[in-house]
Image (cartoon, coloured by chain):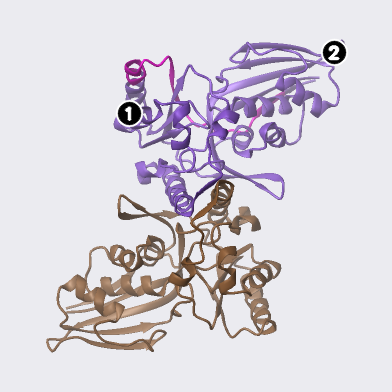
Chain colours: A purple, B brown
């Protein structure tokens, strides 16, 4: 058996869409699985290759669970920065499950942390809404305007999602919950047709401000992206990456401005200019 | 001057979309405005004709505000039940503003109660998301599958929106705010393509259960609509009307079942089977 599966990174939450929205981005993790009677062997390249290889590696755990044994070799090649708010764990789990022949890689991506939106985008591509219904993850595609590009500011600092979740309050004003609902509707309308996308559609009251203490430069980056021409801007996942949502014609200039801004703020890192990935997880099989 | 304007009723909130979504329905109020040098005269027919006519009538107030004088006659003909959760006030304000020649009837509909979603649907038709951004109402169209029909259970009891708002808590669990965001995304995906509409997409944690004390039969009606074949069901606006969202092929049977259920529950009222109204407010001018 020999299978190669490729899954895209994803940017979740997207402003008001806390725990609900995610978009797949053209930045990939590839997992190559080959039978190996001698037992598990894991080789990693690219982002995440500093993590311990062996049975505790997420890709190995997922593939073991799918196959029911560990007689395989895994080669993991990743372009997705780890713990930056780009859904690297969900992408890896989806790719590993697909490489192991799972019928529903989405479910394996979901089981990583019990949140379905990153996994949905990595498994199904495009712009997804996802939720847990009666304990099971469900997801649906939403229309995404092909003229939208994503400028992603990726600082060199890591931010664990679990730590970012710890900053959220137990209770929120009813008014803030309603605020996010209206903005989410405006965002979905604007992502379907970028000419209808308002800057305010990226605004949020449920997680971004609450997480600011973890990344104090966030408000300046978000404002800077909008000033540079992004239609709107928001945190990517639980951060620290920031997302500028742009008209294809403006994305280059926004990325240039974002690089200058990072330099002015004294932040190390990179700025990526990405298209949405509209394909499902791609699997190649060799027998 | 002689103008006739017609605006549709609307059903707001739509399950998880509290204060955010509304759909225009083919049920109308028509306002006919004619110059009358002798001063204001108001004539009403149909629903709402029990309300006092004169300067305090909402249509007269709005038309006065638009025109800056009261030298006109208004004839108001309404098919929209009052205080039932069908946006009758917003529809009337939009129609009166349009009949008076306002450039932006939506703004006048919004000013009735400071909530933009009913007014947006009445002024612009179809499925709308609306919010207040920097004090101003904004709205965007969302895709609505033309194969969807709305079965509306309209009990004979009135429920003032102000009273319904009084039942809402100041604070809600963060988890419930996130719950509604996920459901709203699923709902928007399902309203764009009814084959993708999950029953769970109509679920809500921010207003429906909290308002149950005002209309104890609501849960049975909501469950009954789904059991009878509605794809999902929810409160219409602040109630007491209930909305069944149906495939066009099932709407007739759902309406029949809903009538039986009302009878079994001992509820007076009517059940309407309605299409969405996809036109803007229609204005005819005669000079």
The chain containing the residue under callout 1 comes to A
Q: Which residue is mark 2?
A: A39
Residue located 62% across and 83% down the image: B267
Question: What is the crowding at mark 2: few (fewer than 14 residues within 10 Å), some, or many (at least 20)?
Answer: few
**Residue A191 placed where, x, y %?**
44, 42
Residue A20, quarter of picture: top right
Question: Tag on residue B277?
Answer: none
**Which region of the structure is painted magenta?**
A260-284
Residue located 42% across and 14% down the image: A268
**Circle nearer the N terminus (2, 1):** 2
How many numbered marks are there? Answer: 2
Q: Of residues B255 and A68, which is closer to you in this image?
A: A68
Q: Which residue is mark 1?
A: A224
Q: Of residues B91 and B196, which is closer to you in this image?
A: B91
Residue located 46% across and 72% down the image: B163
Question: What is the crowding at mark 1: few (fewer than 14 residues within 10 Å), some, or many (at least 20)?
Answer: some
Residue located 45% across and 57% down the image: B20
Residue A108 lies, with reference to residue B242, above or below; the image says above
């Amino acid at each position: 058996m020999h299978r190669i599966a490729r899954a895209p990174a994803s940017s979740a939450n997207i402003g008001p869409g806390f725990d609900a929205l995610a978009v797949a981005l053209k930045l990939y993790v590839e997992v190559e699985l080959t039978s190996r009677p001698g037992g598990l062997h894991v080789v990693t390249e690219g982002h995440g290759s500093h993590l311990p290889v062996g049975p505790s590696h997420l890709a190995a755990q997922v593939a073991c669970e799918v196959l029911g044994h560990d007689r395989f070799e895994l080669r993991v090649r990743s372009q997705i920065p780890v713990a930056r708010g780009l859904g690297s764990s969900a992408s890896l789990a989806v790719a590993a499950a697909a490489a192991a022949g799972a019928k529903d890689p989405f479910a394996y991506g979901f089981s990583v942390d019990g949140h379905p939106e990153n996994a949905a985008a990595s498994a199904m591509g495009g712009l997804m809404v996802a939720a847990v219904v009666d304990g099971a993850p469900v997801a649906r595609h939403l229309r995404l305007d092909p003229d939208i590009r994503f400028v992603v500011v990726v600082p060199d600092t890591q931010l664990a999602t679990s730590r970012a979740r710890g900053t959220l309050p137990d209770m929120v004003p009813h008014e803030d919950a309603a605020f996010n609902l209206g903005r989410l509707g405006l965002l979905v309308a604007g992502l379907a047709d970028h000419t209808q996308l308002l800057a305010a559609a990226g605004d949020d009251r449920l997680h971004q401000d609450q997480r600011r203490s973890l990344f104090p430069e966030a408000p300046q980056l978000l404002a800077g992206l909008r000033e540079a021409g992004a239609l709107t801007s928001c945190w990517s996942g639980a951060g620290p990456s920031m997302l500028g949502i742009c008209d294809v014609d403006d994305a280059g200039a926004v990325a240039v401005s974002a690089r200058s801004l990072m330099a002015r703020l004294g932040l190390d890192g990179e700025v990526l200019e990405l298209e949405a990935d509209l394909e499902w997880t791609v699997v190649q099989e060799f027998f």
